[in-house]
Image (cartoon, grey):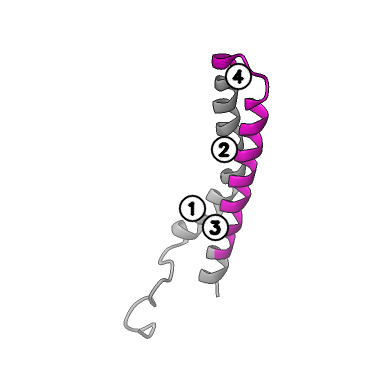
Amino acid sequence: MSDAQGPRQGAWPTWKARAAAYLSVVWILPCSMIGCWMIGDYLDRRFGASYWGMVGTVLGLAAGFYETIRQTLRIGKHGR
């Protein structure tokens, strides 16, 4: 489709959609890390172990990095 007929396939139509995508990248890593740390801390208290908090933090960090990279590549593809 040309610009006269409407937005192209897959394009972000508004500045709000672009802003939401950029803001989501900012919050992915800390939220996933803190969320998994909280689950690990709960498991520590529940089972009397001392390593689940660290395991949760590392898993949250890995998941956060994966999602951050995935979202960044998606934003880069739409920005062209």
Circle 3 Cα neighbour tier, 10 Å, few/some/many (<14 / 14–19 / ≥20): some
Which residue, given by chain and number where applicable, does mark 2 sit on? 31
Front-most of 4 and 56? 56
The residue lying at 60 percent from left, 22 percent from top is 41
**Mark seen at residue 20:** 1
The magenta segment: 45-73
> Could you tell me the amino acid type at mark 4?
Asp
Q: Residues within 10 Å of mark 2 (few under 14, many from 20)?
A: some
Identify the amino acid type marked 1: Ala
Disc 1, disc 4: CB below 8 Å? no
Amino acid at dot 3? Gln
Mark toward the viewer: 4 or 2: 4
**Residue under the image location 42 percent in, 63 percent down:** 14
Disc sitting over residue 71 in the figure: 3
The tag earlier along the polypeptide, 1 or 4, is 1
Quadrant in the picture for the N terminus: bottom left
* Of pointers 2 and 3, the one earlier in the residue sequence: 2
Find disc 4 in the rendering and name its residue. Answer: 44
* Relative side of 68 to 54, left or right: left
| Structural distance between the alpha carbons of marks 2 and 1 | 16 Å
Q: CA distance from mark 2 to mark 3?
A: 15 Å
- The answer to which image quadrant residue 11 occupies is bottom left
Residue nearest the observer in this picture, 48 or 54: 48
Q: Earlier in the sequence, mark 2 or mark 1?
A: 1
**Badge 4 element:** helix
Sooner in the amino-acid sequence: mark 3 or mark 4: 4
Task: Give the farthest residue toward the left.
Answer: 5
Residue name at image x 63 percent, y 50 percent:
65
Image-based side of 79 in relation to 6, left or right: right
Compared with 25, 72 (above or below) is below
Measured Cα–Cα span from mark 1 to mark 4 = 35 Å
